[in-house]
Image (spheres, helix red, strand yellow):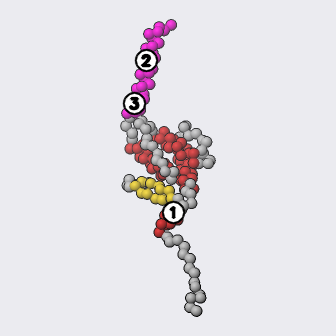
Amino acid sequence: MPTALEIENASLRSRIQSAEFHLSRLTREQSSDERDEIAKAYARADAAAAYHGKRVSAPKLGETALEYRRRLIESLKQHSPQLKTSRFDTADAATLDVLEPIIYADAVAAGKSRAAPGQLIEIKERDAAGREITRYHGDIRAFLAPFTRGGMRVKINRDAGS
């Protein structure tokens, strides 16, 4: 029968192994392919979130590209009528390749439909070179109203000449 000291040592060894595992995961070097995949996922999700006036968060320290993609679609799935109740915590890359375009398209469509009459929504995006581009979506009359004249009434006085 193990003594209390042996049990405590085994517990400490287990905790040290767990800490070393987590530490190695946090300090691991990401490959260039993984960094590219994270950047692409960020750009796609951020463009969809911009239609709701939001930005997506950056990847967490030690987060893999697959984990990051899952977290991004979790944050935007509420805008997809088909997939808002789905769980993606065990989805693989091939599944995400199919589901991401659907969720992001639904998020963009929901964002476009939220513009009320007489309202413009500012959408900030970044292009491939990193420049910020501002687009507006909504009722064009909200933009043009200050530049248009109100209607005019004209009354012709036909009796003035007699």
Q: Amino acid at mark 3?
A: Ser
Residue 11 magenta: yes
Secondary structure at badge 2 equals helix
Q: Which of label 3 and label 1 is nearer to you?
A: 1
Q: In the drawing, what numbered circle is on residue 24?
A: 3
Residue 53 in sight here: yes
Q: Earlier in the sequence, mark 3 or mark 1?
A: 3
- Residues 54 and 69: in front is 54
Residue 9 pos. (x, y %)? 43, 14
In the image, the segment drawn in magenta is 1-27
Whether 15 is drawn above or below 86: the answer is above
As measured in the structure, the alpha-carbon distance from the residue carrying label 2 to the one carrying label 3 is 18 Å
The correct choice, above or below, for 60 with respect to 14 in the image is below
Can you identify the residue that label 1 sits on?
142
Magenta segment includes 140 = no
Amino acid identity at mark 1: Ala
C-beta proximity under 8 Å, tags 3 and 1: no
User: Dominant secondary structure of the magenta stretch?
Assistant: helix
Q: Residues within 10 Å of mark 2 (few under 14, many from 20)?
A: few
The tally of labels here is: 3
Query: Residue tagged by mark 2?
Result: 12
Taking 3 as reference, is 32 above or below it? below
Residue at 46%, 17% (x, y): give it: 11
Q: Which quarter of the rendering shows the C terminus?
A: bottom right
The location of residue 49, given as percent across then percent down, is: 50, 49
